[in-house]
Amino acid sequence: MPHETSPLSLAQSLLRCPSVTPEEGGALAFIEGVLKQAGFEVHRPVFSEPGTPDVENLYARYGSGEPYLLFAGHTDVVPPGDASRWTHDPFSGEIHGGELYGRGAVDMKGGVACMMAAALDFIRNTPGFKGSIGFLITGDEEGPAVNGTVKLLEWAKGRGERFDHCILGEPTNPNQLGDMIKIGRRGSLTGRIVVEGKQGHVAYPHLADNPIPGMMRLLSGLLSEPLDHGTEHFDASNLEVTTVDVGNLASNVIPAEVRATFNIRFNDLWTPQSLEEEIESRLREAAGNTVRYRLTMDPTNAVAFLTPPNAFVGFIADAIKAETGFQPKLSTTGGTSDARFIVKDCPVVEFGLVGQTMHQIDERVPVADLDRLTGIYRKVLDAYFAAAS
Ligand SMILES: [Zn+2]
């Protein structure tokens, strides 16, 4: 039986799959069925890693020519929490007051549905088009993210796949559809400091060594100067001390040790390596030869990246303007995303639904937004492949 391919119907079908990470929940099987019927070649690689659950993924391609435009996203969702607190069952795909309810409505099954609807409509109406359209859909974005996009990209490269451009359909708009395109993301780096002293009685401080003043010097050394003042497309990098822990319950004991953790969201002036060197140098200076400390940095794969505004970004901005009337802001704000992995293979831009209800009880999307986002992706496809021919 042919599948119904309106964005609403596709989104409802996806929402009805209980695909909480790492469960596939039927979501990828559904996408496979729809795309195969439209002539896509579809693969469903499963990836494993010791200590993490196996995860199913999907890769699909239509056409063999160039240019190759890739749509990327995920079908896994965060848990719904207490389902009884939802107005409508989180996995029922119900519509109420013009809004479609369900876990993943905006993050990001709704976005995936719009990409599919747009691609299928483009293929139907553009006989003989020369390029390729692909889908790179992971089931491991909201979880540990080790058996998802990174491995899927490696797998695709191993098959000789080469992408020209990518649209990642995460919910990028803060308030309304058309607000914001993400053309880059900041990197993230976490560091941990331990200052060691010597425990003792507060009345006999000469027999002890309190590590807290030393930690205070180190932290003020870290925070004394801004890391930078921002760049053309990025805000200034920001260091936040997220915790300082002593765990000392006694008011008459000098503690033996104090620990602190900080996280830095950094722009394109830094790499994790150059940032680590900067942190080490600030701590060395603040410590002088009196504070004994240890610094460790958590491993990170969250580097900063930028897709400079170019013709591709222009196609998306123009399509948004035509469909919504808004001139979208080109932004690099917010947390990290899978775009940081994709950008190693091709320029990537993020644009999807409105993020307001993501990860919340009663996550939902206006049905009108699904139609308009589909219209935007559809216009991008027209402009992208017209420019290439
Ligand atoms: Zn997401």
Image (cartoon, rainbow, N blue to C red):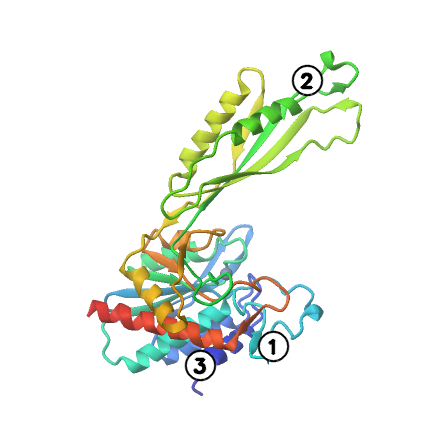
* Crowd tier of the residue under label 1, counting other residues whose Cα lies within 10 Å: few below 14, some 14–19, many 20 or above: some
Residue contact at pointers 3 and 1, CB within 8 angstroms: no
* Crowd tier of the residue under label 2, counting other residues whose Cα lies within 10 Å: few below 14, some 14–19, many 20 or above: some
Task: Name the residue that disc number 3 marks.
Answer: 6
Q: Position of residue 42 (x, y in %)?
A: 38, 71
Which residue is outermost to the bottom? 1
**In front: 154, or 65?**
65
Indicate the secondary structure of the residue bearing disc 1.
loop
Which residue is outermost to the top? 206
In percent of the image, x 41 and y 41: which residue is there? 230
Amino acid identity at mark 1: Ser
Q: Position of residue 239 (x, y in %)?
A: 52, 38
Which is more foreground, mark 3 or mark 1?
3
Work out which quarter of the rendered image holds the N terminus and state it. bottom left
Cα–Cα span, label 2 and label 1: 61 Å
Residue contact at pointers 3 and 2, CB within 8 angstroms: no
**Does the beta carbon at disc 1 come under 8 Å from ligand 1?**
no
In percent of the image, x 72 and y 21: which residue is there? 199
For residue 230, above or below residue 82? above
Q: Position of residue 198 (x, y in %)?
A: 69, 19
The disc, 3 or 1, on the residue closer to the chain's N-terminal end is 3
Residue 89 figure quarter: bottom right
Amino acid identity at mark 2: Asp
> Residue 116, can we see it?
no
Q: Which label belongs to residue 372?
A: none
Q: Which label belongs to residue 92?
A: 1
Cα–Cα span, label 3 and label 2: 69 Å
Q: Position of residue 48 (x, y in %)?
A: 49, 56
Task: Name the residue that disc number 2 marks.
Answer: 209
Indicate the secondary structure of the residue bearing disc 2.
loop
**In front: 101, or 131?**
101
Instruction: Report the side of 216 relative to 296 (left or right).
Output: right
